[in-house]
Amino acid sequence: MSLITFIIGMATGAWSLNKFYAIGEVNRLESYIKDQKLANAKTIANVTALHKKQIKIAADNVKIEKVIEYVPDIRECDINADTEQLLDVSRTGMSEAATGTTATIPRPPAITQRQQIESCARDGVQFRELQSLYDALRQWHSDN
């Protein structure tokens, strides 16, 4: 009789252990699903915010293109190579002499006022696009 009781006790214990393990596994998976839902919701919110910024940037880019169309292309307002070099030095903080070259650097032809405005507008749009992508990536990294 004790052998039968022992076998029934072992079977009941193994069954109970298996059920407790299954309950724990279900709880762990439910917790994982909950965490994934929260992470997914945060990601969707971040991507939505990024797309809204990109749509605004694209709309602003269209406005900039329309404005550029109306900028007169006056040759008297051309920016010569010396002025361009001065603008580059003021923007970067580095003169050509700082690069260590003593050879004469060939000067590019003068650029027009329209080309300068287009370049500045393009740089601004690219900066805003990169900034929005960087912000979205930083937010995603902090969320995950």
Image: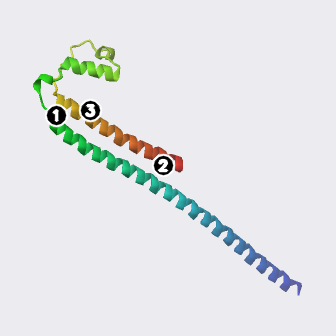
Which residue position holds label 3? 120
What residue is pinned by disc 1?
Answer: 71
Residue found 21% across the figure and 41% down from its top: 65
- Report the residue at 37% width, 47% height from top: 53
- Distance CA(mark 2)–CA(mark 3): 30 Å
Residue 109 in view in this figure: no
Calculate the distance from the C-alpha at mark 2 to the C-alpha at mark 1. 41 Å
Relative vertical location of residue 18 with respect to residue 77 in this rendering, above or below: below
Residue 97 locus on image (x, y percent)? 30, 14
Q: CA distance from mark 3 to mark 1?
A: 13 Å
* Left or right for 103, reference 50: left
Residue that numbered label 2 is attached to? 140
* Earlier-in-chain disc, 2 versus 1: 1
Say whether marks 3 and 1 touch (CB < 8 Å). Answer: no
Viewer-proximal residue among 35 and 23: 35
Q: Is residue 113 left or right of residue 95?
A: left
Amino acid bearing label 3: Cys
The disc, 3 or 1, on the residue closer to the chain's N-terminal end is 1
Between disc 3 and disc 1, the foreground one is 1
Q: Earlier in the sequence, mark 2 or mark 3?
A: 3
- Nearest the eye: 83 or 106: 83
Q: Quadrant of residue 109?
A: top left
Front of the two marks 2 and 3: 3
Q: Crowding near pointer 3: few (<14 within 10 Å), some, many (20+)?
A: few
- Give the residue drawn at x 53%, y 50%: 143
Type of amino acid at the residue the image marks with label 1: Val
Label 1: element kind: loop
